[in-house]
Amino acid sequence: AGLADSERERDLTRCAAPRLERRMLRLGSIRVASRAAAGLGRACACAAGSPTAAGGVVETVSGSCWAEPVASTLSRRTPPAPGSTLVRGHLLSSTASASRESSTPVQRLFQTSQPRSLQTEQSYVQVEANDKSLIGRLVLKVGGYYSKESQLVRGSNSLLKMTLDHCEGSGVREALGLEDDFRTKHAFLCLHVWMVLRRLRNSGQDGKKVSQFFYDNFQHEVEMSVHREGVRVRVNKWLRQLEDIFFGAAKAYDGAIDQHAEDFADVLHRNLFRGEGDKGRSHALARYAIRELVSLSMTDTEAVLSGRVAFSSSTD
């Protein structure tokens, strides 16, 4: 367990100064520095400048990473082409457990709750700037902490951390009886990433920038999760295939919502339930996804760009 924690901390120590090169802007720019202060993680936001004795940034994060280490490896089967049906066994962990049954009948899930703004008072990832002194403020300014790009980077980091923690710990996946394996977790995360990116499309030029930062951070997290699954060879091949899966699913979701090319519940049934089992679960998931999509559309754009949003965990 100690070794796994060390690996996870090393994953979170990839720092990058604010710059236009998108590949340097990763979720890993949040560096866990210590576990003191009642267990709160302390971090320096690299997009805000390098920490010094005179000034810097402390970033407090909560929750855990999306994919916990398991003693299994990814299936070696060839994945489907973009937009095609996901077949049973694709990326299914060899130690995958059976789907967990919901204590609430699936027909009652997400029936009564109404869409609402998802705005929160504070961003999911809290940043405390050490700007009490003149030198501290100067260091932050020179490091780019106050720049528009740094603010957008922090917003994208907050959005993705919120999305990761929601997918892992909200209880929605368990309520729907989804499998607890890599493939299903990835598909569930892809659904939420698609919802966030869809909302950012309507957020102007800043939304486009946050979308790029957010997507690059997401791909970095997928890469880290693949490593945590134990894959050490042909990693780039797996990453390309997982990216194809995301784009194929996103295209199918957009087609179902915008063009009614296919029933949304059927698309979800194929991508998250492997086309098997009671379709009532996929209809429940469709109700949940539509509720969250409408809720995101009701959320103030500035709140979305700054990461002051949180998905709803209500199963009513």
Image (cartoon, grey):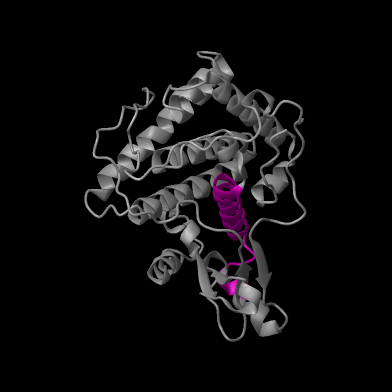
Q: Quadrant of residue 287?
A: top right
| Residue 150 sits above or below residue 82 on the image | below
Identify the main secondary structure in magenta.
helix
Tell me the magenta residue range. 140-169
The residue at the point 38 percent across, 70 percent down is 3
Indicate left or right for 111 with 84 as reference. right
The residue at the point 24 percent across, 35 percent down is 77
Indicate left or right for 214 with 242 as reference. right
Q: Classify the position of the N terminus by image quarter.
A: bottom left
| Residue 102 sits above or below residue 32 on the image | above
Find residue 123 and report its horizontal and vertical position in percent. Answer: 69, 56
Q: Nearer the viewer, residue 44 or 81?
A: 81
Question: From this viewpoint, which residue is outermost toward the bottom?
Answer: 53
Residue 256 within the magenta-colored segment of the rendering = no
Q: Nearer the viewer, residue 147 or 220?
A: 220
Whether residue 310 is visible, yes or no, is: yes
The residue at the point 52 percent across, 21 percent down is 278
Find residue 95 and report its horizontal and vertical position in percent. Answer: 35, 45
| Residue 118 sits above or below residue 114 on the image | below
